[in-house]
Image: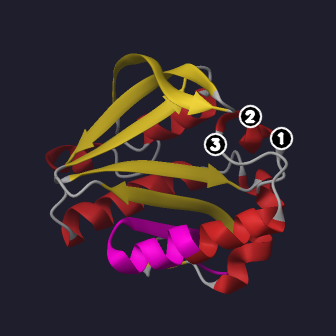
């Protein structure tokens, strides 16, 4: 569990499957996040059981449900794909009802702070399909430095697409503190 002011980041449980399914129906999420379409309950179960829980236990990933610390309302998901070489890649999405409230930048900053303090990570990378302005704003508010554009680096719905890339180094963490600066 990661305490982050008004937010709490906790590991996934099987009780989160229905919520993941519900949020993954959102057209805005499906536009840029590599999720199956149509998104079925079995996809949500696979994500929670195998990617979040099993790969979390093995150290391959660190996936968290972002909750309102006061109410327990599920707001978002943030995770790190660990590469084993001192680097990881961050990924996140926000439930439609929680968008525009600063949840994602705070959660991304909190998971990065936790990862830099609790693991041997030295660098966390962010990538998003070009055009995903919301994801780019979140990464920038969380302190990521935009490094450039990668040609045809991501695959989305079977098509190669260009990507933005940014990074956050361990010694850069203090500059943003998840506040949107």
Q: Is residue 33 above or below residue 25?
A: above
List x then y, in percent, for residue 177.
Answer: 35, 52
Q: Which numbered dot is residue 50?
A: none
- Which residue shows up at 43% across the image and 34% down it? 140
Quadrant where the image shows the N terminus:
bottom left
- The segment highlighted magenta reads 50-72
C-alpha distance separating marks 1 and 2: 6 Å
Q: How many marks?
A: 3
C-alpha distance separating marks 3 and 2: 8 Å
C-alpha distance separating marks 1 and 3: 12 Å
| Image side of residue 76 versus residue 127, left or right | right
Q: Is residue 169 above or below residue 145?
A: below
- Most foreground residue, 142 or 95: 95
- Image marks 1 and 2: residues in contact by CB distance under 8 Å: yes
Colouring of the image: secondary structure
Residue 129 lies in what quarter of the image? top right
- Which residue shows up at 51% across the image and 78% down it? 53
Q: Is residue 139 above or below residue 69?
A: above
Q: Give the residue at mark 3.
A: 34
- Image marks 3 and 2: residues in contact by CB distance under 8 Å: no
Q: Residues within 10 Å of mark 3 (few under 14, many from 20)?
A: few
Q: Residues within 10 Å of mark 2 (few under 14, many from 20)?
A: few
Return the disc, 1 or 3, that comes first in the chain's sequence. 1
Q: Give the residue at mark 1.
A: 27
Q: Is residue 71 visible?
A: no
What is the secondary structure assignment of the residue under circle 2? helix
- Whether residue 63 is in magenta: the answer is yes
Q: Give the residue at mark 2.
A: 31
What is the secondary structure assignment of the residue under circle 1? helix
């Amino acid at each position: 569990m990661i305490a982050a002011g008004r937010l709490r980041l906790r590991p996934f449980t099987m009780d989160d499957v229905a919520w993941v399914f519900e949020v993954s129906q959102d057209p805005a999420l499906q536009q840029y996040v590599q999720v199956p379409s149509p998104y079925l309950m079995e996809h949500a179960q696979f994500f929670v059981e195998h990617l979040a829980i099993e790969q979390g236990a093995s150290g391959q990933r660190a996936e968290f449900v972002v909750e309102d610390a006061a109410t327990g309302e599920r707001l978002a998901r943030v995770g790190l794909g660990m590469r084993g070489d001192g680097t990881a890649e961050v990924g996140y999405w926000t439930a439609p009802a929680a968008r525009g409230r600063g949840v994602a930048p705070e959660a991304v900053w909190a998971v990065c702070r936790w990862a830099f303090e609790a693991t041997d990570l030295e660098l966390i990378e962010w990538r998003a399909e070009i055009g995903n302005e919301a994801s780019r704003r979140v990464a920038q508010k969380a302190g990521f430095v935009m490094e450039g554009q990668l040609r045809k680096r991501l695959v989305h719905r079977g098509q190669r697409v260009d990507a933005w890339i940014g990074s956050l180094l361990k010694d850069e963490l203090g500059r943003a503190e998840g506040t949107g600066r």
